[in-house]
Image: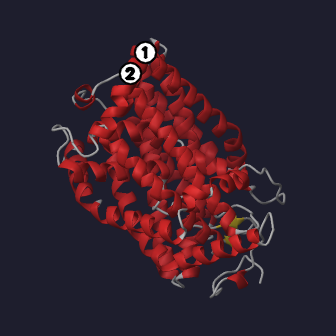
Amino acid sequence: MSYESFIDMVWEFDDYLWYIPLVLIVGLGLYSTLKLKGIQFVQLKEMCRVTFSMEKTEANQIAPFQIFCVSMGNRIGVGNIAGPVTALLMGGPGAIFWMWVFATLGGATSFVETTVGQIFKSRDAEGRFIGGPAHNVAKGLKSKKFGLAVAVLMIAVYIGGYVLSEISTISTSFTGAYDFEYNHLVIAFILCVIAFLVAIGGFKRVAQISTVIVPFMAFAWIILCLVVIGINIDGLPSGVRAIFECAFNVPAAVGGGVGAMITIALRRGVWSNEAGEGTITNISSSAAVAHPARQGLSQSIGVLFDTMISTITALVILSCLDVDQILESGKDSMPLLQEVMELSIGGIAPTLVFFFMFLFAITCFMGDYVIGENNLKFITSNPKARWGLVIVTMCIVAFSAYYGSDGLYAIMDVLLAICGIVNCFVMFKLGKYAWEAWKDYMEQKKAGIKDPVFHKSALSNSEGVTEWDD
């Protein structure tokens, strides 16, 4: 079987598989929104306050703002640039509307996932907090075997899914900007070196680097996109109009009708903001906070920031090209974006796109590797296993850099679908802990306590909760 045939087969399977997480993720988002009384709308002020408080922590712990930056480094990355462009190519402008809908629900979902992750977090050998879906299952559902299976899934999603797509996107951006013989080999070598350096750096170093890079790169990308949109401002009204017109009136070039477009929007949206997958809790559970709900609020607003950047990226394309030009371009996401940028700001555009993709993808990769390693620690404490993960990661980096294309996103998509199914099952079981934590947080706020402190006695059942005092 050829490489192209294999990718086509994976895409076809993926198209059918995603209908299951579509129902589950939307259902979890609606249920969470109702239970939390629209928390993603009415608590924006509190979300900003707890996210940007810059509070201090113990020397060996990770501060909430650092965790926010690491998590946004994972969210604001390849998914925000390649994600919306791929959504336009596969589903048309209407897919952006449905990405907004799912992101709106995702704000509540992210609060639930993150709060549950904080409640059931653990400590590693160095005394730092560590957590995520595997810990939630092992401690919350009291199933060590299921937890081990989830840990394996997390490693597959991050190392075999996210890393694969991120490195592939860097590669296609590089080869689009620099056309010379053996360019694939050059970028593969560079990325393997970086991958090795990240692997030996550790979470604390990743958090420190992300705190510096993420705010800068997000702001700079927004400025660049706004400049391009400004140059093509005459096309902006028609581009915005196309988003709403195509939301229910799907262009003929998009096969499968509204259902297919909605599924594409969810797939690309989940890749970008991770709400409903539970994956971001691998990072957010590491924060040292006084109350689980604080980190839940912080990650909820993270979905909002993520969606804003995705929308601005989509408008770069829509302000320059009409619907038919987008759907009939026949290009992968990065070459299309580089072409639009080049039409607007000239020959420097491919280099600029590569520069941003490199920063975005590397910050994502840093978080991805650390998450893979943390889940490996859940499975085994054998130090030899860590070096095995390093070797596997570098092999995946080399492969995806050399064979970089949008086709590799199919593998990531399948893994994300499985992850969504598992996470929704777990959250429907453990979501009650998030409701109770939020109730406790609000009761303390109403009592005049500016910064509520959590005690596990606030839960109706605190069995399995080990890192919070009574």
Q: Amino acid at mark 2?
A: Val
Q: Position of residue 301 (x, y in %)?
A: 59, 52
Q: Residue at x 54, y 43 (%)?
A: 76
Q: Position of residue 459 (x, y in %)?
A: 65, 83
Residue placed under numbered mark 2 in the picture: 340
Q: Nearer the viewer, residue 455 or 411?
A: 455
Q: Amino acid at mark 1?
A: Ser
- Residue 31 left/right relative to 441: left
The image's mark for residue 287 is none
- The correct choice, above or below, for 467 with respect to 206 in the image is below
**Residue at far top of view:** 346
Q: How many marks?
A: 2
Q: Residue at x 84, y 57 (%)?
A: 59
Residue 403 can be seen, yes or no? no
Q: Position of residue 83 (x, y in %)?
A: 40, 41
Give the quarter of the figure containing the C terminus: bottom right
- The correct choice, above or below, for 216 with respect to 340 in the image is below
Q: Secondary structure at mark 1?
A: helix
Q: Residue at x 65, y 33 (%)?
A: 216
Q: Which quarter of the picture shows residue 452?
A: bottom right
Neighbour class for label 2 at 10 Å: few (<14), some, many (≥20)?
many
Q: Are marks 2 and 1 in contact (CB under 8 Å)?
A: yes
Q: Position of residue 200 (x, y in %)?
A: 66, 49
Residue placed under numbered mark 1 in the picture: 344
Neighbour class for label 1 at 10 Å: few (<14), some, many (≥20)?
some
Q: Residue at x 65, y 51 (%)?
A: 68
Marks 2/1: CA–CA distance: 6 Å
Residue 244 can be seen, yes or no? yes
- Residue 332 left/right relative to 344: left
